[in-house]
Image (cartoon, helix red, strand yellow):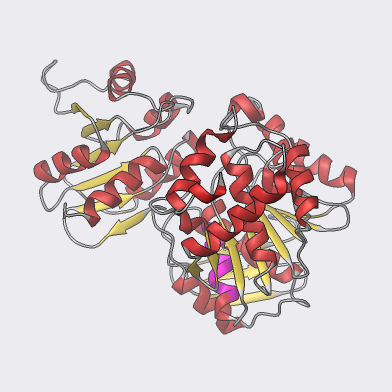
Amino acid sequence: MQNSLITLADWLAMLETMHPKAIDMGLERVMQVKERMGIAFDCPVITVGGTNGKGSTCAMLESILLQAGYRVGLYTSPHLIDFNERARIGGEAVSDEALIESFAAVEAQRGDISLTYFEFTTLAILRLFARAGLDAVILEVGLGGRLDAVNVIDADVAIVTSVDIDHTEYLGTTREQIGFEKAGTFRQGKVAICSDPVPPESLVRHAEAIGADLWLLGRDFNYSGDKLQWNYGGRGQRRNALGYPSLRGANQLLNASAALASLEALRHRLPVGAQEVRNGLVMVDLPGRFQVLPGRPSVVLDVAHNPHAAATLAQNLDNMGFHAYTYAVFGAMQDKDIDGVIAHLKDRVDHWCVTDLPLPRAATAEQLKEKLLDAGVVPESKAGSEKTVEIFASPADAFANALSRAGENDRIAVFGSFLTVAGVMQARKSGYH
């Protein structure tokens, strides 16, 4: 079979159909293949889990460590446009060739063990990192924590950024249930960091029960600041007069504090100077997280796809200053709390451009429109309302329509799913401006 898999696209297409279930929680199969392959790290490993804020925290950690001159491996998911975005070494996406070689190595070792797309690709990227002579490895946890494929690696520091309701069919329906799943990445005798201002009791209890060294926001580390700069204070380290991270948004100091707490915990193995922290925070870049594109009308890209993230997006939109009208390009997965997302944003949006997405588990544009009507968004044709709700076949079409109607003092917010944001990014790349 391997002989017929020539390109990265060939491999990815095969992996999508290899396992009967797209998501199949459990570590047994992945652990077996990992052991067979002898994947291990002799440098510090940081895992980053949480409902929201994982990507930002990973990006800040990578940026600071690169500024400090370390060779860093960063694994994140999902990707926006190219699969290669998931694996970065030294700040650069890895090549197709490197990925293909690692995929072939996993295929050669897995025998009759069936792996999901995520499990297979995670093992391939871990193998790639283990052979790359790295100084530090940052691994974003895919879904939950306890049963996520990334959790086959014992982290030196495990971060949980936030705990909120998402992926309820796998993780539970309460913050306590979900907090327990997230805490599954913690290890005995190792540092466990939680930057959620109100950590679930289950997370705290689990950390204590296994003997992890738990650092809590407000107890073990904290931040303070004014409009110009901010300060971090940890158990034994202060960082003063820091510039704000270049990532915009209300929660970025929570994420930055978790990143700095993890670096404090590792300071004897990965020393980082004050200027390197400052430079890293100023230079960090992460597409699709409250990303405001240059030009007019204002265009905001945000992968907010659950109520917690939508509340943050609403707050960030409020902080942007005056815009005459706001257009939304909105597409979402059916298994998300779409009503919860709409509840936070319906009063900030005048014109909704809802879109189908190219995945079977996506909600249709028609379903999104129904949910908007149920939430009390009344289109123009009824009762003289100035709101509109229009349906489109793709994010590109929805964005093109919003762009054609928006004035230069308006704004367009693109949100609801990675696929929505990716569709608009690709459309812009190929010519809609």
Residue 242 on image: x %, y %: 53, 75
The residue that appears at 66% across and 32% down in the rendered structure is 175
What residue is drawn where x is 34% and y is 40%?
A: 420
Which image quadrant: the C terminus? bottom left
Task: Return the x and y of residue 36 as percentages of the image width and height.
Answer: 79, 51
Magenta span includes 171: no
Q: Is residue 360 above or below residue 181?
A: above
**Residue depicted at 44% across the width and 60% down the height:** 286
Identify which residue, 376 or 404, lies in the foreground. 404
Image height of 73 relative to 338, above or below: below
50 relative to 244 in the view: left or right: right
Regarding residue 35, the answer to whether it shows in the image is yes
The kind of secondary structure the magenta stretch mainly shows is helix
Q: Position of residue 273 (x, y in %)?
A: 63, 83
Residue 219 shown left or right of residue 420 in the figure: right
Position of 363 with respect to 196 (left or right) is left
- Foreground pick, 41 / 377: 41
Q: Give the range drawn in magenta.
A: 56-65
Q: In which quarter of the image is residue 170?
A: top right
